[in-house]
Structure formats: C-alpha cells, structure tokens
C-alpha cells in the first residue's frame, strides 16, 4: 500500500525538524565560549591582518603576504581580515563567525552522511531497491535518520570546542566547509550518473574544479579529499560505472582528479623530502621519534573521541611525552592501529560504512600525524577526522535498528549519546568562556604542559597574587627545563621589583646560546626590551638586553625561518639603539636575505626595521647608506624607497627637508 502525499510530506518534515533541533542545540551550547579570549597564536596571526581601509591594495598585501607566502591559506586570511576590519580586537565576533561556519558544516555533514547511506543501500544489491521505480540519487527518509545521528555526534562532540573557540582555526573550519562541498558534489554526481549522466558528471566536476581548490586556499589539509574520495569509491561506490556512462569516462575522472593528485603528492614528498624535513632542526625530536610518538597521539585522539570527558581534553597538549624508542607499549599500540586498518578492509562488503569510517579517520590524519615536523598533538586536527568514527557508530546503530527487538534500544542509545555529548560540550564551552577558568582547568588536568603553567602564571601576575607567582615560576621551569623563555619570564617578573641575581642572567644567556630558539624566546625578550626602555625594569641595563639579543641572533638553532628573522630583527634594533651599527647591519643583512625568501610582508617589515635602525644615525647620508647596504637587491630597494621618504632621525646632526630615494645601481 503506497503512502499518501500528505503522509510523505510529514515523514520528510520530521528529519528536517530534528536537524533544526540539532543545529539550535549547537548554537545554544556554544554561546558561553564566545566570551573567551584570543589564545596561543591568535595574536601573531591576526596582527598582520589589520587594515585601515577596505581597498584592494591593502587587502592584496594582507591576503598574499604574512606568515604564509602567496596563495597559501589566502582565503582564510581574507575571511579573518574582513572580520578584523569590522570587529577590531573583539574576540567574540571571530568566535561567533566560527560557530556559524561550524553549524553550516554540520548541515553539510548531515547531507553527506545521508548520501553515503543512500549509496551504501544501493550498493548492497538490486534486491534492496524497488525495481518498479527509477533509481533515485537523493536520500530517502530512511537515510536521513542515521545521517542525523552522524550530524549530532559530529556537531555536538566536545572535542570540536578546540576548533570552534580557537579563532585562527577558522582555517580548519573553512577548509572543511569547501572539502565537504567537494565530497557532496562528487557523491551526489556519482549517484546521478545512473539517470542523468551529463548533470552527474557536471556536478562532480563542479566539486573537483571549484570547491576543492577553494578548500586548498583555506588550508592544505583539503588535499586529503583525494584519498578520502578514493576510499568512498572503493568501499561504497565500488568504482561501478552506470549504463548511462562508459566505464572509461568514469576511470578518466577518477584517475585525473583522485589518483593523479595522490601520485603527485607522493612524488612531491620524495623530491622535496629534504626541505620538508628541514623543520626538525627546530624541534626536540627527529622524524623517527615523531612517528613513534604519533602512535600514542592517535590513540589519545581515539580515546578522546570514544570517551569524551572534558577534563581530559585541552588546548594544551604541548607536554605530550616524546617516544624515543620502540618499546613494547608502542609496538602493541601500533599493532592496534594496524588491526583497525585491517578491520576496515575486512568490513568492505559486510559493513562498508563502518570500514569507511575507520579509513576516514586515518586519512584525515595522514598529513599532520606523519612526516611533517609539526607539534606533536592538537585537538583541532580531529575536526574532519571525527566524521569517520561518527559515521561508523551511526552505521552500527542503523544495522541494530533494522532488527525489531533492538530498534528501541538502538534509538534510545543514540538519543542518550547525543544528549551526553551535548552536556559535555556545554561544560567545556563554559570553561573556554573565561580565561581564568580555562587556565585553572588546563593547569589542573595537564601537569606536563608548559603552556598551561605559563597561562596560569600570567593570570597570577595580572591579578597581583604574589604568593602564587613564585610557586608557578618554579613549576613552569620544572615543566620546561631545557628552554629559555621560562627563565625570561622570571627575569621580567623579578626585575620590576628587585635586582635579578647574576646566576639567573648567566643561565638565560647559556640557554639562549645553546638551546633551540623558539618564538616564545623572541617574544619574551622583545617584551623585556620594552620594559627596560620604558623604565619598568630598573634592575636590567640596556647593555644586558643587547647581550641577550646577541645570544639569540647568533644562535643558528631556531624553531623556523620566521623565528630566525624575528631574532635577527630584535638584535638589530637593540644594537642600533646603543649605537652598535656594525652588529645591527650584520643581523639585518642576514634577516633581509631570509625575509626575501619568506614573503613580501616579511621583506617589507624587515626593511622597516632597517629604517628604524638607521634612524638612530647622525645624518641622512649615513642613514641612507646604511639602508642601501643592508637591503641589497631591487625588490628590497623598492620597499626602502617607500620607507626612507618618511624617515625621521631620532638624534640628527643635521637634517635636510627630505631624503633622496635610493638609486638602483
């Protein structure tokens, strides 16, 4: 007996209402987190994006320069630049837009999951499809209900707070948005090939030629969509070509857009292996140690996904222990990961969506949990990877629900799980909404994290809790015993109230000369210089700051090229202030060379530092000769001309009315 039109409308309306409830719950649950602060590298990433006018020249420079050179992440930077232009330093505006994008992604996740359930039902055989009807490409109501569970599990999981409430991770959210659109277009197009080959092929190409490149312009992780779609083809769509499209045409599309990019990526890794691995010089671990540690990190992620306890989650996993060798625990955990991969292969025919969910998780960690010399662990790396476990769990519950005796149990279990996730996310969002709550939570639950101790120390200093400061200083140095920046923090705190001991200065200099120079070292030394210049640090002389800056600038062991440029520029500024133009010029020459290879923004910023150093000279002729000497090359000269025209000497011996531009030789 066929259903009446009104019954079908009501049946189709129920999933839509459920989706609205899930999205509304997500909006309400995340509200407390919107009042939270900027965190970690939010400041360094957002400061260069400040523009005064909404003009193409300013936008172009902001988007195509900065920390990432050229088009890399340019679309994400455009989004953040526009938000900063409107909202300034209001963190809540950035976080609210992140949340809206997260909800949009939840909608796309629901749609994508419904298509996957539809494709899996079709792929199990003709017996499951009504032969009296033309095959449909759109999901049925039966596909939407498990898809809604996938949406709820993914959208409301507390692990996602580390992405949504962390402003600069808009790069991840936007990249996921366009990646999901790519997958939607591809799978919907594949399902349409059976009835409308032209429309289906056009939709597939729309995703691959438009949305996929846009995702790559947000963050490089979108490149993983190629192996992800290959996994969908292999496990769910099974590379089947419908009658309306030749098998050769389908093979061309799959080979050109999915297989070829994977091969080119492997070739790129092989050719650029040396440059890709160069970043290990600025890490406390090598490639083999990172790969061994990632075995433990992946199990951490799995545990946080399957046992979502807010207290175990944190923005700060920088204290994660490095695995220095292959011990029995690491071997067992590696075998466990291998068992999961083998299970995905074994489930290809009996439970393809479960297998796809397992492979999906590993695919979306293939970039950040393998070769690249990145930090060991961050929760936002699970943003799209989390879709895999959600899909696998929903597929299992959907299979259970197909059996009448278990139907109510499966439905009740799904509802209880979604509610539990929502409550845990609400708890975590509340914690992230206040700096003191976030600091106390991270400090209490992650005793190995130096960043958690640093945040706690900063809050104690700001609130004037002098009794806690000494304890926190000692604890911070215990958590990070081999780096300089905790000692620099102690120096800044102590020099405002007393004469710092000589042994502290000696230890700082020794660390700066021998250990890896990190961005935090440069930032704290820059802050120390400002305190000394402003008279807020009576116990430290400017010569002492110069000695420390020289130690930073002379240490070739740096975290990355950006840190090296910052260290050299700092050394040059301090040396120029004290009249040591030989040291300033030497540092600036190297800095300009590095900045030229980095990006136009870094080149311009470094030339500006050269002009600032030159402003301490006695005459314009000397100043211009200095800038000309340290900014060798035509490109740097162009920036120098712009800056020199507004140059004002701080201690002029004689001043002319204007400075002559630098002539190219």
Image (spheres, rainbow, N blue to C red):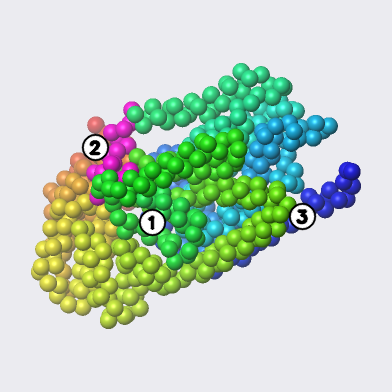
Query: Pointer 2: what residue?
Result: 632
Quadrant in the picture for residue 487: bottom left
State yes or no: residue 362 in magenta: no
Secondary structure type for disc 2: loop
Circle 2 residues within 10 Å: few <14, some 14–19, many ≥20: some
- Between label 1 and label 2, give the one nearer the viewer: 1
Question: Disc 1 and disc 2: Cα gap in Å?
Answer: 32 Å
Query: Pointer 1: what residue?
Result: 41
Tell me which numbered mark, 1 or 2, is placed earlier along the sequence. Answer: 1
Question: Magenta span covers which residues?
Answer: 271-292
Residue under the image location 23 percent in, 71 percent down:
474
Tell me which numbered mark, 1 or 3, is placed earlier along the sequence. Answer: 3
Q: How many marks?
A: 3
Instruction: Identify whether 535 is placed above or below 68.
Output: below
Q: Main secondary structure of the magenta part?
A: helix
Evaluate whether residue 109 shows in this view. Answer: no
Q: In the displayed structure, does residue 268 sit left or right of residue 245? A: left
State yes or no: residue 286 in magenta: yes
Q: Position of residue 505 (x, y in %)?
A: 13, 65
């Amino acid at each position: 007996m066929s259903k009446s039109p009104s019954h079908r409308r009501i049946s189709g309306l129920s999933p839509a209402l459920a989706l609205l409830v899930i999205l509304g719950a997500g909006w309400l649950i995340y509200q407390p987190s919107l009042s939270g602060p900027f965190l970690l590298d939010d400041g360094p990433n957002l400061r260069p994006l400040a523009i005064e006018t909404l003009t193409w020249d300013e936008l172009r420079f902001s988007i195509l320069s900065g920390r990432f050179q050229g088009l890399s992440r340019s679309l994400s930077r455009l989004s953040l630049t526009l938000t900063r232009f409107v909202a300034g330093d209001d963190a809540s505006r950035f976080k609210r837009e992140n949340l809206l994008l997260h909800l949009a992604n939840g909608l796309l996740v629901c749609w994508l999951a419904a298509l996957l359930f539809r494709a899996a039902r079709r792929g199990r055989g003709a017996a499951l499809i009504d032969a009296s009807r033309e095959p449909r490409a759109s999901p049925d109501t039966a596909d939407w209900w498990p898809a809604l569970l996938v949406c709820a599990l993914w959208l409301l999981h507390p692990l996602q707070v580390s992405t949504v409430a962390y402003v600069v991770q808009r790069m991840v959210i936007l990249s996921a948005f366009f990646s999901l659109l790519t997958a939607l277009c591809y799978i919907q197009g594949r399902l349409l090939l059976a009835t409308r080959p032209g429309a289906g092929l056009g939709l597939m190409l729309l995703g691959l030629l438009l949305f996929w490149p846009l995702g790559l312009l947000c963050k490089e992780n979108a490149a993983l969509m190629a192996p992800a779609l290959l996994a969908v083809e292999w496990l769910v769509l099974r590379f089947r070509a419908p009658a309306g499209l030749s098998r050769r045409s389908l093979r061309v599309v799959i080979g050109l857009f999915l297989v070829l990019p994977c091969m080119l990526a492997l070739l790129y890794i092989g050719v650029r292996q040396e440059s890709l691995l160069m970043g290990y010089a600025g890490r406390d671990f090598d490639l083999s140690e990172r790969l061994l540690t990632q075995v433990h990190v992946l199990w951490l992620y799995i545990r946080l996904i399957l046992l979502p306890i807010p207290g175990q989650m944190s923005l700060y996993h920088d204290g994660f222990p490095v695995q220095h060798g292959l011990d029995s625990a690491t071997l067992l955990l590696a075998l466990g990961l291998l068992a999961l991969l083998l299970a995905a292969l074994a489930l290809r025919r009996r439970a393809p969506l479960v297998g796809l969910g397992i492979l999906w998780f590993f695919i979306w960690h293939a970039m950040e949990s393998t070769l690249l010399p990145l930090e060991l662990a961050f929760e936002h790396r699970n943003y799209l990877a989390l879709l895999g476990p959600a899909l696998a769990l929903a597929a299992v519950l959907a299979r259970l629900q197909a059996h009448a005796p278990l139907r109510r149990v499966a439905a009740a279990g799904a509802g209880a799980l979604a509610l539990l996730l929502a409550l845990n996310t609400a708890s975590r969002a509340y914690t992230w909404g206040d700096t003191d709550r976030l600091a106390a939570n991270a400090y209490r639950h992650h005793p190995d994290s130096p960043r958690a101790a640093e945040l706690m120390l900063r809050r104690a200093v700001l609130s004037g809790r002098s009794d806690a400061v000494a304890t926190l200083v000692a604890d911070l140095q215990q958590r990070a015993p081999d780096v300089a920046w905790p000692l620099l923090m102690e120096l800044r705190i102590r020099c405002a109230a007393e004469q710092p001991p000589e042994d502290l200065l000696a230890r700082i200099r020794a660390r700066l000369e021998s250990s890896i120079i990190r961005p935090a070292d440069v930032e704290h030394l820059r802050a120390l210089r400002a305190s000394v210049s402003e008279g807020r640090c009576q116990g430290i002389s400017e010569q002492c700051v110069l000695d420390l800056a020289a130690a930073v600038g002379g240490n070739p062991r740096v975290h990355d090229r950006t840190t090296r440029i910052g260290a050299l520029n700092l050394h040059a500024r301090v040396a120029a202030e004290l009249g040591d133009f030989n040291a300033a010029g030497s540092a600036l020459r190297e800095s300009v060379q590095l900045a030229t290879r980095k990006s136009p923004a870094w080149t311009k910023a470094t030339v500006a530092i050269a002009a600032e150093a030159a402003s301490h000279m006695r005459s314009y002729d000397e100043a211009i000769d200095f800038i000309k000497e340290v900014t060798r090359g035509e490109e740097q000269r162009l920036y120098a001309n712009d800056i020199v025209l507004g140059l004002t000497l701080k201690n002029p011996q004689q001043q002319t009315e204007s400075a002559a531009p630098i002539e190219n030789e």
